[in-house]
Amino acid sequence: MLESIKKTADFIQNKVKTKPEIGIILGTGLGGLVNKIENQEILEYSDIPNFPVSTVEGHSGRLIFGKLGGKNVVAMQGRFHFYEGYDMKQVTFPVRVMKELSIKYLFVSNASGGVNPDFEIGDLMVLSDHINLMQNPLLGKNYKELGVRFPDMSEAYNKKLIALADETASTVGIKLQHGVYVGTTGPTFETPAEYKYFRIIGGDAVGMSTVPEVIVARHSGIPVFAISIITDLGVEGKIIEVSHEEVQKVGAAAEVKMTELIKKMLEKL
């Protein structure tokens, strides 16, 4: 694993001039943020050694290097999911590579279903914590070069970055919700009983990604900021049939606000 990480990072460093400070992972239908990245250098996942390939509609499958908010960034336009058949080591491999590329912060976005009755479709929710109902990506052999055997998760989502998001949102007039994200394997959308259960156990939103990447980032010592776009509601009385196409459509509409927020945050970092 260590050899694969180094080989992939070496390949990338030989292909692009940008030395990224910030890593960005873009969720379903949220790849439009890359249009704001300046001086782009692009690598297709299929051309990168050891990289999986996105198989889900709404996930393009490219690494975009360049400048956003005055900072050097590397953005994943398309992520990998456990439900695609990849194991957790493959799902989180890009985070390991970003660490090898010396990123200082990781920004993560996703599309999720809201289970908090105060949420509305199109809301932006800053993740304050998560509940992991997926397989843990750190199962198996631990490499001390990558992190400790038992990493602390008392601050999975960096409080300073959350405060920066709140400050930034208030100055540009963007409403933010805060909440706990429940990570599930998917690929089915949730049943009404599951939505109810997720709310009872302390969840505010539910989705099929993010948690594995965050765990590995924290294992690697990288501070994380994560944000969800609420694309549908799992609230009793508001549950309707959900499609992947609808999730993409709502995500794209709310993405403008998310992009502005992240860009402004990077300017202040």
Image (cartoon, rainbow, N blue to C red):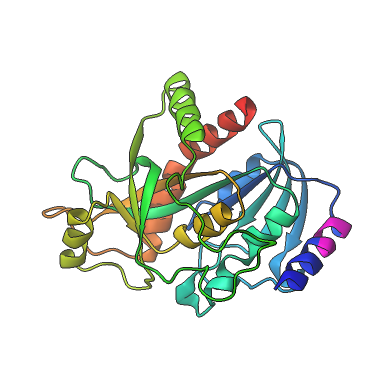
Q: Is residue 118 left or right of residue 136?
A: left
Indicate the quadrant where residue 33 lies. top right
User: What residue lies at 53% left-to-right and 33% top-to-bottom?
Assistant: 260
Q: Is residue 25 above or below residue 172?
A: below
User: What residue lies at 57% left-to-right and 54% top-to-bottom?
Assistant: 217
Work out whether residue 120 can be spotted: yes
Q: Nearer the viewer, residue 124 or 196?
A: 196
Can you name the residue that lies furthest to the bottom here?
A: 85
User: What residue lies at 54% left-to-right and 38% top-to-bottom?
Assistant: 259
Q: Is residue 210 above or below residue 46?
A: above
Q: Is residue 112 left or right of residue 211?
A: left
Indicate the quadrant where residue 80 lies. bottom right
Q: Is residue 117 above or below residue 164?
A: below
Quarter holding the C terminus? top right
Q: Nearer the viewer, residue 246 or 169?
A: 169
**Horizontal and vertical percent for residue 205?**
31, 52
Quarter holding the N terminus? bottom right
Magenta part of the chain: 10-14
Q: Is residue 165 above or below residue 234?
A: above
Q: How many marks?
A: 0
Can you name the residue that lies furthest to the top here?
A: 171
**Horizontal and vertical percent for residue 83?**
45, 75
**Horizontal and vertical percent for residue 186?**
37, 71
In reply to whether residue 186 is colored magenta, the answer given is: no
Work out whether residue 240 can be spotted: no
Q: Is residue 10 left or right of residue 147?
A: right
User: What residue lies at 70% left-to-right and 61% top-to-bottom?
Assistant: 145
The overriding secondary structure of the stretch rendered in magenta is helix
